[in-house]
Image: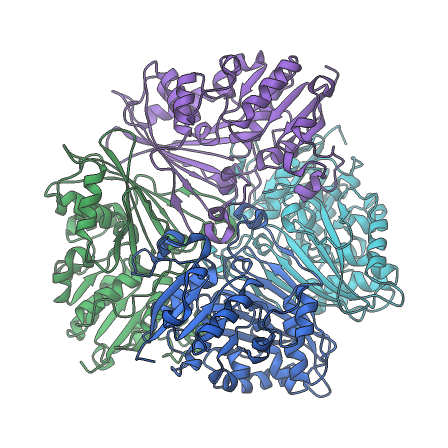
Chain colours: A green, B purple, C cyan, D blue
Amino acid sequence: MADKANIGILGASGYTGSELLRLLLRHPRVDIALLTADRRAGQAMRDVFPQFSPYALPRLVAIDAIDWPSAGLDLVFCALPHGTTQAVIATLLETAPNTKVVDLSADFRLSDPEAYARWYGHAHQAEALQREAVYGLVEVYRDEIKGARLVANPGCYTSCAQLPLIPLIRAGAIDTDEIVIDAKSGMTGAGRAAKEAMLFSEVSEGFNAYGVGHHRHMAELDQEFSKAAGRTVVPTFTPHLVPMNRGILSTIYVRGTAGKGPEQLHAILAEAYRDEPFVHVLPFGEMPHTRHVRGSNMTFIGVAKDRRPGRAIVGAALDNLVKGASGQAVQNMNLMLGFPETLAIDQVALFP
Amino acid sequence: MADKANIGILGASGYTGSELLRLLLRHPRVDIALLTADRRAGQAMRDVFPQFSPYALPRLVAIDAIDWPSAGLDLVFCALPHGTTQAVIATLLETAPNTKVVDLSADFRLSDPEAYARWYGHAHQAEALQREAVYGLVEVYRDEIKGARLVANPGCYTSCAQLPLIPLIRAGAIDTDEIVIDAKSGMTGAGRAAKEAMLFSEVSEGFNAYGVGHHRHMAELDQEFSKAAGRTVVPTFTPHLVPMNRGILSTIYVRGTAGKGPEQLHAILAEAYRDEPFVHVLPFGEMPHTRHVRGSNMTFIGVAKDRRPGRAIVGAALDNLVKGASGQAVQNMNLMLGFPETLAIDQVALFP
Amino acid sequence: MADKANIGILGASGYTGSELLRLLLRHPRVDIALLTADRRAGQAMRDVFPQFSPYALPRLVAIDAIDWPSAGLDLVFCALPHGTTQAVIATLLETAPNTKVVDLSADFRLSDPEAYARWYGHAHQAEALQREAVYGLVEVYRDEIKGARLVANPGCYTSCAQLPLIPLIRAGAIDTDEIVIDAKSGMTGAGRAAKEAMLFSEVSEGFNAYGVGHHRHMAELDQEFSKAAGRTVVPTFTPHLVPMNRGILSTIYVRGTAGKGPEQLHAILAEAYRDEPFVHVLPFGEMPHTRHVRGSNMTFIGVAKDRRPGRAIVGAALDNLVKGASGQAVQNMNLMLGFPETLAIDQVALFP
Amino acid sequence: MADKANIGILGASGYTGSELLRLLLRHPRVDIALLTADRRAGQAMRDVFPQFSPYALPRLVAIDAIDWPSAGLDLVFCALPHGTTQAVIATLLETAPNTKVVDLSADFRLSDPEAYARWYGHAHQAEALQREAVYGLVEVYRDEIKGARLVANPGCYTSCAQLPLIPLIRAGAIDTDEIVIDAKSGMTGAGRAAKEAMLFSEVSEGFNAYGVGHHRHMAELDQEFSKAAGRTVVPTFTPHLVPMNRGILSTIYVRGTAGKGPEQLHAILAEAYRDEPFVHVLPFGEMPHTRHVRGSNMTFIGVAKDRRPGRAIVGAALDNLVKGASGQAVQNMNLMLGFPETLAIDQVALFP
């Protein structure tokens, strides 16, 4: 690899695609060499996202038109819909095996083919790659990611639940049969597909839960929590939609195991993240706001006392498009390509 | 009382005051005889709330300027801040004992003087009235309200938790040691006082929990849940702020007692509210949206299955200014004055 | 007609359709006998708009399935898309000539077949009805509406420009060559069709002009302003989208003719609307807010002095779904069926 | 000056102050040496703006506690309220004459003492500095700014009107007696002071004009337009509030002078800004959206044809806190300290 890496973004017409571009346009070690968007092929990026109007960028192409070996890409971000992704990546890695891939879809997050088939209703089409893929939550799998060729970028909801819970589960500090995660997401989490339920007038001035009892992000939580606990963990998880663009807040209800009160849980988290650049634990009793991480790669975590003895309320906030998707993906890229981990993703939050 | 009742609103410059006026201006059996707002005394209602510009209304006066006996009021709505209320109502009922009162503050909601002192930090100043006051959740206390002189209108958060939970607690259908209420409110619930944290730019495009572990509405929940259960009940309750004007959504996590699965819980609620004009239970598995009750006196309730066996997720949505405050207050007035219960509060929700 | 009129709503799955239903459910003189929605035929209204869940309503049917004569409808509201409307209404009035129609589309607003063809790109398919139709701006055409069989309900933008300008034009008080209308609309004005540009995340936290120089509502303005002036009037008109659900604000820049300063323009408007129930002229210098008319059938008008001598700034605000569409349509119905004009549309604005 | 400049921010508890900090924390050539906030003195920046919680920053101090000479500051940003600013800066520059100042208030924007007195109601307290100050619109006064000690950062509304209009006025391409500027701003433009009218519930879901005919930014427009024209120019200017945090959109109505149609006006602007890093002229007929410049220092300009012959509609969009305030201020600092002009302010817009 030369001084600068050649980067491709597959699926540049969606929100995670444009967010990757926002970050990478200010990354000093990458060149944007390829942008795809099948339905918008032939158009300029500014036709799809006018905020890029002032920048010189390659024209959008269709994936089928790409010859991977001659594309000369060092790393590809794959921001395609679930399902179509696995075939694309299989082809890419077969024909250009030295290219690295950060996949932002859910296709490679579950390592167990059976779990995948159960949650997605069909067999995985690239099981060898499914086994090869490294789960890309940097704070948990940093070392594995550095050597990986294919990284499965975590889901936004699950990142916002794993970061506050994994250290507590690993420490055996909470009852893993009693985890309730009440999660709230901004609307960009629902993507850019034109659906009636996502129209401004349908969303504004309202609030609701959805996918109650059966949201697919649960599979990812089960896998990672169970791995951290060394036993099967099945949390309750309820997602909600907030009339805002960006941000996820998790309010998590836990019971400490013997001797672990809220203060101890807080201490465990503060210690776990003391040196992490993108996870910040607030003073005990303070709870995070999504607005204070907007546009940044930061996760804020807070712990407060419940009035029921032995119970704690843990809060976590991140920007679903940054630490919950594209910022996390660039963090993974930085590790995979040997760049400083925080390069181009160290912006301060945009508030208000 | 003549064909029309003479009505006063104390505290007409706040949101519950203006919402009372919105409803009462279309009530065929009342005359607005008195509007108070101490800091705006002498002004017209239109100076405080321009939407009333087209209507003929009495000028705002200060409470101290009122001679209660000569005011000739049949019923007074008291929408004053907590704390100042009890002295005002004590004076009013002493000097004009035939006037009826619906109080929208928290001052008369707790029937136990000790609980009041513990939560509010000072002794109650009108303990006899505290004993006399009837708790004004119509669906629970309809008969008592009909004969009451002083009704304590319930809090918005608590209404949105009591309506879905009281029938389940009464039926012994849920484990009362395991209730988690994750509540989300629109910003009008925070009132109209000018505070930095309530500015548009501080609130928009963000989401957060607040008052974690110590919100005063808990006292009201404890009282009513314990009364319904016949034993002490202490739920977990976490309020959040949603960037919207109106609406409360409660997402409630419960465990059914032996033999009571989510479907049974749904059946209990559907039966309990079958004939209620202002509580609507959605088909099993559907969850309520705040937007579908906006501006109406309706409460929507939904029940869904959690994937953890034996557990259910119960949702409730209401408009905090209507069924959570002023609509509930007019419903109480209708009962106290012998009017049809739904008069002037049967508007259909305003969506979008 | 019996004591109650039988009413049909064609196109009940859009926002103007649901808004008609919201108003008519509280109208004491109508029965909802028919609701159509071609793509949702067979479904219940609650499946399309959950806020109607508590109400008993006829199931949605397809228009082609209706036999107009046997439907026995006294009046039909037509809330169908432009273009498809004229054929539907022609069939309806041919087979059930005693039914009255209020059409909320643009199909019958232009009385000149040539103007229609020029703006819409095809010949009108029901020219006789086009000639018969009465333009339904009540404050201008009240008498004609009372006897009409077919009323063309005005556009939302145009209502918000005509109400403040028609009296000034009629009085010869402003230079009709120098009218600039800068209009801003909430998102419900764009309808309920699922389009990327209307998604919450595309709209929230942003503001823009659109249709600059060629919005079709201009044709309606030209027609009505020219009629009022007795000469051709071609105003400048620029629409904008506001990240809110409801409301239109027009900011209008005018030059008074000799001797007519801003105060005189204000006096003309105040006099013109002194007895109108749904147009309210604010004191001189006060400008209207859309929030103060939200959910109501009211229009607020204000006039202020520009600092350039002889020039005035005129503001008007209305709720695009009420006075700008469905409230105006019910007002027309009330006149056409001989009901009191304000019946069921006299709600007070919902603020906040 | 060493490799890094020592920077102070006066008034760090307001939105322009925090926005300066957001940008400067990623500026490679500055150290944040001083932060003031009189009412919050002694607190940490994180207590005032929690998004800065992860960063090491000096504690807030009161201005009176500063000894300017020993503070050793190379440049001070002054983000204090109008009026108090001039005395603070006079003291600063008297006691530490080598410090440079970028003032974000209105205090030094008007160069004419009489104009200042007329618009602000009192004599200027530092007339010598008023004469010395350079007006800080970089695209117009770049050379003067490079050598300036005191720069008066332009107002947000005025920047968004000057950038599209100054080249047209200078070229004599528009009739300067016929300029109408209809401006719309997000709520951060109103600052962070706790006022009832700025509460979320007062602002959300509504739209209105304000300050009609007498907004103080007019004085700045008059001065700069008249300077550009070589004769007195008095435009019509009407500001509005949009329920969003950031962004200003100007819709400007102009008449071309003989031979200058909309296309010619577009060509003049495109040529004027061809090499400017922060002003981007869209293709003819496209109009700008505020959302596409959010969080960036970019201004987007568009020109479209009005249907009235000879007339054009010019649109401009910028982020009021960046190019309209703090980004412009950093751009000024970069020039004053000899840094590359785009350093730390070249972020891509945050959309959605």
Q: Is residue C275 left or right of residue B76?
A: right
Image x and y of residue B155, in percent: 48, 28
Residue drawn at (68%, 72%), measured in percent from left and top? Answer: D115
Vertical comparison of B205 with B71: above or below = below
Q: Nearer the viewer, residue D140 or A245?
A: D140
- Front-most of residues A149 and A90: A149
- What x and y, as percent, mark residue A299? 29, 54
x and y percentages locating residue B90 in the rendered image: 58, 18
Say if B130 sits above or below C55 in the image: above
Q: Which of these two is toward me, A197 or D10? A: D10
Q: Quadrant of residue D134?
A: bottom right
| Residue C43 visible to the viewer | no
Report the side of C97 relative to A297 (left or right). right
Identify the residue at horizontal 66%, vertical 15% (top origin): B95
For the point 58% across and 69% down, which residue is it?
Answer: D107
Q: Position of residue D15 (x, y in %)?
A: 47, 60
- Quadrant of the rendering where the N terminus of chain A is positioned: bottom left
Count of labels in the image:
0
Residue furthest toward the left? Answer: A230
Q: Is residue B115 visible?
A: yes
Side of C93 relative to B203 (left or right): right
Q: Quadrant of the C terminus of chain A?
A: bottom left
| Above or below A311: residue C102 | below
Residue shown at 70%/42% (left/top)?
B46
Q: Is residue A169 left or right of residue C54?
A: left
